[in-house]
Image (tube, rainbow, N blue to C red):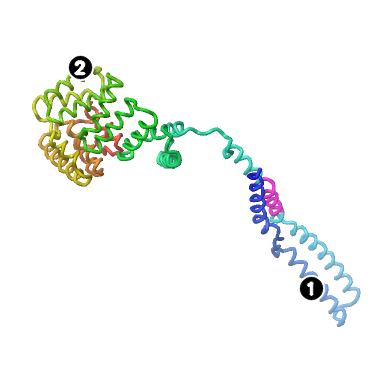
Amino acid sequence: MLFWILVAILTAAVAAVLLLPLLRRPVAAAGDASHDVEVYRDQLEELKRDQATGLIGASEAELARAEVARRLIAASKAEAKDRASPAERRNLMAQAFVIVLLPAIGLCLYIAGGRPDLPAQPLAERLANPGNDINMLIARAENHLARNPQDGAGWDLLAPIYYRGGRMEDAANAFSQAIRLLGATPERLDGHAETLIALSSGIVTAEARTQLEQSLKLNADNPRAKYYLALALEQEGRKPEARAAFEALAKEAPADAPWLPLVNQHIAALGDGASGNPTAEDVAAAEGMATGDRQQMIAGMVESLATKLQENPDNFEGWMRIIRSYVVLDQRLKAEAALQTALKTFPAASENGKQLLALAKDLSISAGGGGQ
């Protein structure tokens, strides 16, 4: 009841402010009719003066006075009609709108979308249908989570959106919160692990490996977890084991699996010893470094990989890794340049080219003319 009393008082106050200028009578503009009235009145006065001075006879004065009076009456009627002008009628309509229609419209809008007893709009539904304004929707979701940090569904939905937008630190936090609040699933664990790997510029850290092993326990047929665990073996320098893991993954994969060419690239690289991945010493050193030092080390590794790719542009897995690494280092122009160079070797119509374009879409980078 108190709410409605406050609404009524505020509505009355706003209506009063709007009505004050409308209640003042508008000053009528001097039209032709009012001008004629003044002229005819002056003529009557002039006739009186002429008759008094003898310039005009009484009978002539009477006839002239009758004619001027007739015209004065007609002009007075026209003037009265002008005073009841459309502007005055519009003034009355505006007053009626402020007093009646404006409060009615506001009440209808409130009943339609502002009542506190309306059912909630789940965050999941709003994020699932973002329309063309996803940035605004993300901002609203973030405000919602700031007020409701225990909303696991919100964290669960924002995490992959952060990842696709290149906001890796936010994605890692969101995946972690979703796992804490909703429990571990292969999708959440894999997403968290992949985010940690991206933050380390492609290095499968100990924390990421723990997440992947837990995911594989929940789903033994999880190719995503198997791939990154095989990659971890490769990075540790355990090439025979890594090759066996990749070969097992390739054997289990459907013939049309989109990630199968990438697995075959690893198998081929491990066969001729040209993988170009970080060594076990690199991984251990990176995990023990401060953030700034780790970024410097990653930049050095990326520069080394770029040199190798210039010498051997057929290294598809290397292109995938360096593009992601540039995005992690916030060097998006270099990532776009690397993507365009890679598409010259692996055209967009090929399987490898399609994977490059899919990666570009996930990381929100432009493929330029190479994507045509």
Judging depth in this view, the residue of 51 and 16 nearest the camera is 16
In the image, residue 130 sits, relative to residue 14, either above or below, namely above
- Sequence-wise first label, 2 or 1: 1
Judging depth in this view, the residue of 149 and 46 nearest the camera is 149
Q: Residue at x 31, y 21 (%)?
A: 218
In the image, residue 30 sits, relative to residue 195, either above or below, namely below
Where does residue 188 sit, x and y in percent of width and height? 33, 29
- Identify the magenta region: 89-102
Q: Residue at x 25, y 40 (%)?
A: 328
Work out which residue is located at the far right of the displayed protein and give it. Answer: 59
Based on the picture, tell me whether residue 100 belongs to the magenta stretch.
yes
Q: Is residue 343 visible?
A: no
Location of mark 1 (residue): 42
In the image, residue 30 sits, relative to residue 47, either above or below, namely above
**Left of 161 or right of it: where is 286?**
left
Mark 2: amino acid: Lys
In the image, residue 10 sits, relative to residue 337, either above or below, namely below
Q: Examine the image and state in which quarter residue 123 appears.
A: top left
Q: Where's the C terminus, which quadrant?
A: top left
Label 2 or label 1, whichever lies nearer to me, is 2
Labels in figure, total: 2
Work out which residue is located at the far bottom of the displayed protein and give it. Answer: 53
Q: Examine the image and state in which quarter residue 4 appears.
A: top right
Q: Where's the N terminus, which quadrant?
A: top right
Judging depth in this view, the residue of 326 and 336 nearest the camera is 326
Location of mark 2 (residue): 251
In space, the residues marked 2 and 1 are separated at their CA atoms by: 113 Å
Q: Examine the image and state in which quarter residue 250 appears.
A: top left
Where does residue 244 sit, x and y in percent of width and height? 15, 20
Q: Counting other residues with Cα less than 10 Å from the Cα at mark 2, is it few (<14), some (14-19), or many (20 or more)?
A: few
Where does residue 84 sit, x and y in percent of width and height? 75, 56
Q: Residue at x 30, y 20 (%)?
A: 219
